[in-house]
Amino acid sequence: HKTECMYWGEIWKNHWWIAEFPSIYEEGEWGIEIRSKGEILFKDEGLKIKNNILWDSTIEWSSVDMLERRRHFTGFGVGWQDAGAKWAESPAQSAMIIALEELLERKKDTFDEVFLKRIYEQIVCGCDYLILTQEKAWEMGFPRGAISHDILGHEKDILPNDISKAVIAYIKAVNLLPDDYADKKRK
């Protein structure tokens, strides 16, 4: 297969070129050579062509792997550190839980059992943190159902938006977690 390289433009202080191969329809792994006036300027092996390659090669790292790595930064063993600050704000926790739940709703059949278990564990990890924010609000005299914005710095902030997001995360967790998590679902 042959094609011409086309100048794409400049970004990040680099110049970028594109080579499209519309004649390749099958998935596979390819070698590539870029030539100019008969001289090989670049040669490499391992160019993969596959449907959904970006999704398939990044979903694990951009979901459960990153969360497993950020869990210990909260200091509570549950939830995930948010954006490099010491806080683990409840709306960010809820949003991540909901994103994991949407993975189950949309793609569950494409995941192996090990990956599914990791997703379930991270949903539980996030929900357990939200429960801590509820307990913190209750300790501080707020009514049942209140959720502290986070536990380390904004615990006195009780925001309706935080509570509504947590409710969605909880409801979806109860509906999507398997029976192995019955105790967590009741909590």
Image (cartoon, helix red, strand yellow):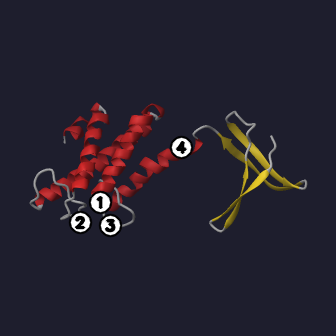
Give the percent coordinates (x, y) of residue 175: 28, 34
Looking at the rendered structure, the kind of residue marked 1 is: Glu
Residue under circle 2?
154
Which is nearer the eye, 116 or 55? 55
Quarter assignment of residue 114? top left
The residues tagged by marks 1 and 4 sit, at their Cα atoms, a distance apart of 27 Å
Mark 2 packing: few (<14 Cα in 10 Å), some, or many (20+)?
few
Residue under circle 4?
55
Left or right of 39? Residue 80 is: left
Q: Nearer the viewer, mark 1 or mark 3?
A: 1
Disc 2 + disc 4, Cβ < 8 Å = no
Image quarter (top left, top right, bottom left or bottom right) of the N terminus: top right
Looking at the rendered structure, the kind of residue marked 4 is: Trp
Residue under circle 1?
89
Secondary structure at badge 1 equals: loop
Sooner in the amino-acid sequence: mark 1 or mark 2? 1
Disc 1 + disc 2, Cβ < 8 Å = yes
Number of numbered markers: 4
Disc 1 + disc 3, Cβ < 8 Å = no
Mark 4 packing: few (<14 Cα in 10 Å), some, or many (20+)?
few
